[in-house]
Image (cartoon, grey):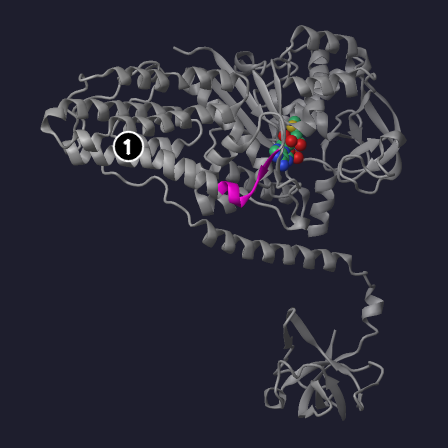
Amino acid sequence: MSKGKYYITTAIAYTSKKPHIGNSYEIVLTDAIARFKRLQGYDVFFCTGTDEHGQKIEEQAKADGITPKQHVDKIAGEIKDICDNLNTTYDHFIRTTDDYHEKAVQKIFKKLYDQGDIYKSSYEGHYCVPCESFFTESQLVNGKCPDCGAEVKLAKEEAYFLRLSKYQKQLEEHIENNPDFIYPESRKKEMINNFIKPGLQDLCVSRTSFKWGIPVTFDDKHVIYVWIDALSNYITALGYDPDGSGEMYSKYWPADVHIVGKDIIRFHTIYWPIMLMALGEPLPKQVYGHPWLLFGTDKMSKSKGNVIYADELTARFGVDAVRYYLLSEMPHATDGSISYETIIERYNSDLANTLGNLVNRTVAMINKYFDGVLPVNDCTEELDKGFIEDILSALPVMEKAFSDFRIADAVEAVMNSAKRSNKYIDETAPWALAKDEANKNRLSTVLYNLLEAIRIIAVELTCFMPDTAKAILSQINCEEASYESILSFGAAKLGTKVGTATPLFTRIDAAVMLKEIEEEMQKKMQAAANAAEIAGIAKIGIEDFAKVDLRVATIKECEPVKKAKKLLKLTVFDGAANRTVASGIAKWYKPEDLIGKNIILVSNLKPATLCGIESQGMILAADCSEDDVKVIFVDGIPAGSKVR
Ligand code: MSP
């Protein structure tokens, strides 16, 4: 029997670039909640997807020489792959370029316009291209964008506006009458004090400065600006249509919770409710603004070289270990941080030691002492009662933690059961019981209690580590994984043969892995620094480049220079005559490596005297690393050929 419907969503991710592990945290978090609700018996609809329009995407695609659609297809594919790789159970993946979404958004815009909630005016302000937002003078920080720090430019645009001011009072009342609407409390205060109380300004909802957006049907100069487009996904995904929605919409809307990051709570608790009020639709029951995952205390960014992607982590640690880490490490309200040290530490202590050992030891003992089949579970002692109570107490703790979005506490409750079970092993000392045949019944009961505790733990773990949960249930050969079966103790059956004890997690040698990671990070940082350097080099026009005369030349003679260890003195034939060139490549080449080779010569370089040698040109070589230089050989091309 279903406990009712539960509609849960994530924010839809921008398709500007491949998302890092911080962005991916949200989908894992939402998945854990969706899985738990399903376990409890709710009819869950879990929606995620991608936000694909906007100027930034248009510009990026242009720079890459592809269409915006090609660009978003690629990134949306990568994002979906990440969601799948992380084993998330979304029911629907919406893309804002989906036809049904675009059509519904156009109708929403038109309806709001027709009823006077959207009106045409013009916008003047400081515009930030990366954030696609206008800012007033007072909002700027040191004259730059307050959100991303980029340069802003003064811009004026004809635009459509959504009347937020008209709904201010209604929104305030809603927030007051629904104390859990904005969650947690700290975010609610921030919204009320920083944004609502100072007075809502009408929101600019169209643009004329770029084309990659959903066109306004009745004014083709304009495209709908991203927030009306993006936020509508939550209802268009259910088939919302202002002219009459289908069954899915009536069944699942309003959303039970929108899970979003702290940076976009404002859009979800001010603009989105007002849009819905204007449309005459019910508001989502709750918006949970989760904190951010940082690298150390830093934001992750490709240009800093500290960005970590989900697929890198899952390749190294496995999907469940990554899910476990994210869910157990992220605080409820303050930012969390990711570091390889803590991942390895948690992996070894929680997964390999606590959980892995518990399952391994128990299954091994059942095999060793009973050939895999337990005969009885009725030789109980007083201490079993406390143990069973402790194991059963995890579920109510989890339920409370989930309803407060304190997912790390829910994970902890299950891990506490695993720790408690290990303690029970120490307390009952099965190996000692096994020494005396007279204790057979007691030993079977103890191992049964452990087996059942492990079953309950595995069922509870399904929300966090689904594959591990499956592996445990298969190792203990138990299929009973329902919510009802973990409300009380005893669903594991006697008489079933457990499988072979197979380690769930192999301990990681922290020192070895950290060294390997450090080397990879260094390479990434170097690559990021190189990219930044390349990006920072002044651009030249083709006319500047045309001034450089590059020719293929043949090295005829080559000798070391006595007074300068670094130099080689070359005689090269440039297709017309021989000339002398001094080149600082003695560290990497001997004369015999060079004689007879064709190279590229900068032939119109002004002569310069180096250690007494007049050098009449320069040969091209590449800096492969700080300590490795390679001359560019072009054998097979005749001397004198122009390179351009
Ligand atoms: N497209 C908008 C959302 C529109 S919803 C109608 C957007 N996209 S995003 O790709 O930038 O972010 C997607 C989600 O990831 C947001 O909820 C955002 O807060 C979250 N995160 C972005 N960086 C994050 C971390 N470092 N850590 C945790 N969550 C992060 O915003």
In this picture, is 155 found above or below 162?
below
Residue 300 at x, y = what percent? 64, 43
Is residue 26 at all visible to an observer of this figure?
yes
Residue 556 at x, y = what percent? 67, 93
Q: Residue at x 80, y 16 (%)?
A: 163
Tell me which segment is drawn in magenta. 336-343
Question: Does 264 sit left or right of 328 as displayed?
Answer: right
Residue 406 at x, y = what percent? 54, 22
Q: Which residue is mark 1?
A: 474
Question: Does 181 sit left or right of 421 as displayed?
Answer: right
Ligand 1 - quadrant of the structure image = top right
Question: Does 261 sit left or right of 196 as displayed?
Answer: left
Under circle 1, the secondary element is helix
Tell whether circle 1 marks a residue whose Cβ is less than 8 angstroms from ligand 1: no
In this picture, is 287 found above or below 263?
above
In this picture, is 256 found above or below 539?
above
In this picture, is 108 found above or below 345?
above
- Say what amino acid the circle numbered 1 marks: Ser
